[in-house]
Amino acid sequence: MPVSYAAPDAESLYPVRGVRLGATEAHVRKPNRKDVLVMELAAGSKVAGVFTQNRFCAAPVILCKEHLAGGHEIRALLVNTGNANAGTGEDGLRHARESCEALARLIGCAPEQILPFSTGVIMEPLPVDRIIAGLPAGIDDLHEHHWLRAAETIMTTDIVAKGASRQIALGGRTVTVTGISKGSGMIHPNMATMLGYIATDAAVSQQALDSIIDHAVNRSFNCITVDGDTSTNDSLILIATGRSGNDEIGPADDDYVRLRDAITDVAIELAQAIVRDGEGATKFMTIQVEGGRDQAECRKVGYAIAHSPLIKTAFFASDPNLGRILAAIGYAGIEDLDVSALKLYLGDQLVAEHGGRAASYVEEKAAAVMQAAEITVRVDLNRGEAAATVWTCDFSYDYVKINADYRS
Amino acid sequence: MPVSYAAPDAESLYPVRGVRLGATEAHVRKPNRKDVLVMELAAGSKVAGVFTQNRFCAAPVILCKEHLAGGHEIRALLVNTGNANAGTGEDGLRHARESCEALARLIGCAPEQILPFSTGVIMEPLPVDRIIAGLPAGIDDLHEHHWLRAAETIMTTDIVAKGASRQIALGGRTVTVTGISKGSGMIHPNMATMLGYIATDAAVSQQALDSIIDHAVNRSFNCITVDGDTSTNDSLILIATGRSGNDEIGPADDDYVRLRDAITDVAIELAQAIVRDGEGATKFMTIQVEGGRDQAECRKVGYAIAHSPLIKTAFFASDPNLGRILAAIGYAGIEDLDVSALKLYLGDQLVAEHGGRAASYVEEKAAAVMQAAEITVRVDLNRGEAAATVWTCDFSYDYVKINADYRS
């Protein structure tokens, strides 16, 4: 079961004026499950996106980047699960284009106004005919209240649907921010995450929207890892429909920070939900690294700890075998690190200083901290003012089981 | 059980003139097991070493480097298991010095002529009194024929003792090269490995010995990974006693290459044995990356594949879910990689080209290859002449079990 996370109620995901969502069973890979999602956006919506930096990026990622870079007004998003359409070469690109063309014909826009997304098995041909055949049913299903249904549709090895929502008052108007995400394995986003879609009905300038997505992703999806594998398909999309009736928000406006922070909150909740639902996860770990010369070296240390199978299995076992954390800090790649200057904490307890175990350390107390479902590891590098946080989960028998069985 | 590897017979590990080995049960961590090893070297022996680059390197590693850098003639090596004496601060250094002093007194040399080594749990105080108390019994046990006994003594989570031996004729004399190693988890050597000791009775100049150890380690211990965790204690020691009676070999001599290659062969066998005995391993995987611009980028790709938990679990399951390999190549960090130019092979079978699955690919054939205990993955980056090989193992339930239970 996910760590301290349950699927949201349908009512807790507020509709976003100007966004309608529809799902259908297109039998992409398996029968009897919703696997195609259409998100229709009102005319005039603005869209920003960040995508995987994996060189083997999927065909739909290539098309998304093209359509956004071309400045086309985006009118719909099309998502399928069951097949990643990655490692599929020229055929994959053709299939992604065909699916955009089909949806564009049905809703009456140009193919460049569609953003396509795929998630699932890599290096298998996309069953594009079945996806296209399912589109009319997806369009019939379009509704403003279908956010939870959409979150369920984009799940793969996820156990729970992931969604988050906020409402804030901006300039006398109620503005809604609602988002959904999916992801559970192959999670180590680099500039983006698995799939995440966040929409607001606020009116926002394109420049402000681009700035907000950078801010939000660097504090959310770029801080999580399950297994260190950066996917071929990671995408985060931020939509602003402008239907709330507020004046358009630019980067210098007073409301900019409030909207940015609401969107960032939703992004953090969605990103953490992916870790809480990490494949086989039984623990949610927050790795706080502070006192670094710059954020990059803090992130190196945070990810060295978060990626170590030895540390992740020790947390699974609730065993305070914390020397493994010192080892990870030591190989994180900071050449001139003075190990005698740093401090390691588990929860509130000082574990190590002066290059070794702290005199005040009591293993029984550490063992008690390790029993909890949520654990914070804090490293003070004591050489600067920068900090970074990484969220991750432990490594259990079930991780092996899920990934040994995924295709079968 | 280790993958295609059994412990060597005592008779297959030829004695090296000038090296005597003795073991004892000092009860460092657990009773009823040999856990302290003394290796005594004849006067005039030359020694070279390479060590972990982990910034949290263990106290004995610091002392080894000091003693070697000081140019002292090394007369003995002292190894304990059960405790790594790493993350132990100033106390750890003092304990390591005390153990060197005690052994030096007993065999009649200076403390700087001893090299100390520790392996086991990190961040716990070394029980130096018990180690010192065990030294007389270790010295009583010294014998040229005790190589297998020595290999058994340095095991931790290893299932089998690891040793390799060669004899070659140099200048009319028979020269012996014999080595032992230990290691099974926390294996991702960076300039060295777990513990490895290789000795020859050849006479070799210090310059030639230094050159040989670099050559050998870069083709053996620096090509393996089990879990990507670089240990705090990795050490490889190469000893030349000069007792075979050959003329001293310099880097330009004809015999240099033959000796170097014999030592490299032993190093490769010892390094591969560590992977074959990797924690929970059921498969031995050779990752060959070729066609790179330089060796560094080939190694990046090799290690991205070898470290991916998704790939390692798929190999455990014998599931040819090979898209995961494309994803790992894509995130290995080659910025300008042209994914449409590379080729991926499983065994002899072409899996992917032109950015997608090869037309000739037959999954049933790949599935048959995946059933084998030894599997070769080959990547041709098709952008240069450089190549690199990485050896690794799969990721099984038993890896989690071993590391969740290691301390208990």
Image: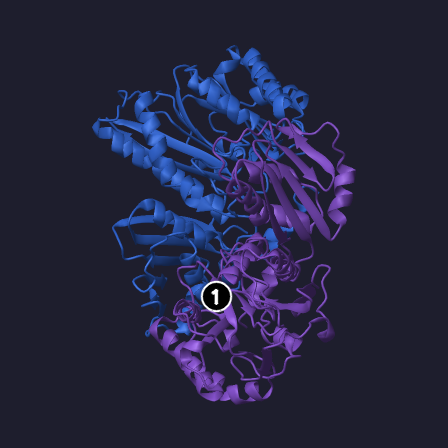
Chain colours: A blue, B purple
Image position, residue B4 (x, y; %): 73, 59
Taking the image as shown, residue A96 lies to the left or right of residue B51, namely right
Taking the image as shown, residue A121 lies to the left or right of residue A393, namely right
Q: In this view of the protein, which residue sits in the foreground, B172 or B128?
A: B172
Q: What SS does tag 1 mark? A: loop
In the figure, A252 relative to B104: above or below?
above
In the figure, A91 relative to B407: above or below?
above
Label 1 neighbour load within 10 Å: few <14, some 14-19, many 20+: many
Which residue is located at x 68 percent, y 34 percent?
Answer: A32
Q: Hey, which quadrant is residue A50 in on the image?
A: top left
The answer to whether residue B29 of the structure is visible from this angle is yes
Q: In this view of the protein, which residue sits in the foreground, A344 or A119?
A: A344
Which residue is located at x 39 percent, y 19 percent?
Answer: A45
Image position, residue B153 (x, y; %): 60, 76
The answer to whether residue A31 of the structure is visible from this angle is no
Image position, residue A293 (x, y; %): 28, 49
> In which quadrant of the rendered image does the C terminus of chain B lie?
bottom right
Which residue is located at x 56 percent, y 40 percent?
Answer: B328
Q: Chain of mark 1?
A: B
Which residue is located at x 42 percent, y 67 percent?
Answer: B65
Residue under pointer 1: B233
Q: In this view of the protein, which residue sits in the foreground, B374 or B266?
A: B266
The amino acid sitting under disc 1 is Asn
